[in-house]
Image (cartoon, rainbow, N blue to C red):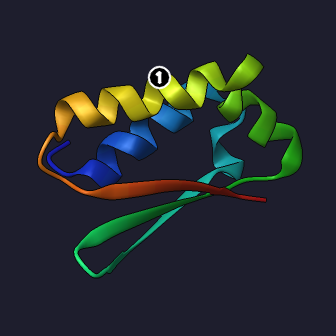
Amino acid sequence: MTDIRDSAEYLIKAVVSDDSQVSLESREENGVIILDIVAPSEIVGQIIGKEGKIIKSIRTLLNLSFPNTRYLLQIKE
């Protein structure tokens, strides 16, 4: 896992019960890497967690692992 996309995908798929329904799309705009999590609504709840704790933890891990990378992590249903 050398880039932020692979790391984010690994963390997200480790959290959900059925990782075959989850995909991660990435693109770059104006120097910012945009990571879109695409998942059905029943799995989005697992990614977000209670009060958003899981998605906040994933963002914290990505911030610590890639401190000089600008990114935006979004969830699409």
Q: Nearer the viewer, residue 34 or 2?
A: 34
Q: Nearer the viewer, residue 68 or 4?
A: 68
| Residue at screen point 52% across, 36% down | 12
| Residue at screen point 61% across, 19% down | 53
Choose top left, top right, bottom left or bottom right for residue 23. Answer: bottom right
Q: Is residue 36 left or right of residue 35?
A: right
Percent of width and height locating residue 30: 27, 81
Q: Quadrant of the C terminus?
A: bottom right
Q: Is residue 60 left or right of residue 43?
A: left
Give above or below for 52 relative to 5: above
Does dot 1 land on a helix, a strand or a loop? helix
Residue at the far bottom: name it.
30
| Residue at screen point 41% across, 37% down | 10
Q: Is residue 26 left or right of residue 70?
A: right
Q: Nearer the viewer, residue 20 or 28?
A: 28
Q: Quadrant of the N terminus?
A: top left
Choose top left, top right, bottom left or bottom right for residue 43. Answer: top right
Q: Is residue 6 left or right of residue 21?
A: left
Callout 1 amino acid = Ser
Q: Nearer the viewer, residue 70 or 38?
A: 70
Residue for badge 1: 57
Task: Check disc 1: other Cα within 10 Å, few if <14, some if 14-19, many if 20+.
Answer: some
Percent of width and height locating residue 21: 71, 50
Residue at the far right: name it.
42
Percent of width and height locating residue 72: 43, 57
